[in-house]
Image: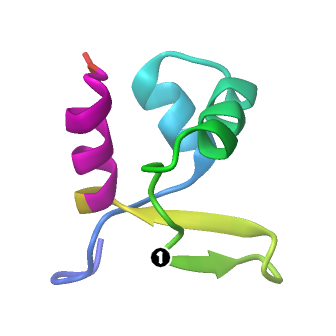
Amino acid sequence: MVEGLPKLYSKADLARRWGVSRQVVKNWESRHDNFPDPAMWVHDDSLPLYLEEDVLEYEKERKISND
């Protein structure tokens, strides 16, 4: 990993982190106003990536454990 770059997560990464399916992550994105906004899009603007700091804040607000 390049030093100084923030950690980014895809929806698949979030699903693994939270122990849920990618569909659940997609549902939460559409249902929760506080779901993180993508920090950037890659793969011809088809893959959103989320900043770790935003993910951590969302976990805290929603009381999601990543254990």
Residue 25, percent from left and from top: 62, 34
The reply, left or right, for residue 13 in relation to residue 44 is: left
Residue shown at 55% from the left, 30% from the top? 15
Give above or below for 16 relative to 7: above
Residue 56, percent from left and from top: 24, 46
Kindly identify which residue carries mark 1: 39
In magenta stretch: residue 4: no
Residue shown at 48% from the left, 16% from the top? 19
Give above or below for 15 relative to 40: above
Give above or below for 31 relative to 38: above
Crowding at label 1, few (<14), some or many (≥20) Cα neighbours within 10 Å? few
Residue 21: name its quadrant: top right
**Quadrant for the C terminus in the image:** top left
Residue 41: name its quadrant: bottom right
The reply, left or right, for residue 13 in relation to residue 3 is: right
The amino acid at mark 1 is Ala
Q: Secondary structure at mark 1?
A: loop
In magenta stretch: residue 59: yes
Total marks drawn?
1
**Quadrant for the N terminus in the image:** bottom left
The reply, left or right, for residue 62 in relation to residue 18 is: left
What's drawn in magenta, residue-wise? 54-64
Give above or below for 37 relative to 33: below
23 or 60: nearer the viewer: 60
Residue 6, percent from left and from top: 26, 74
Residue 66, percent from left and from top: 29, 23
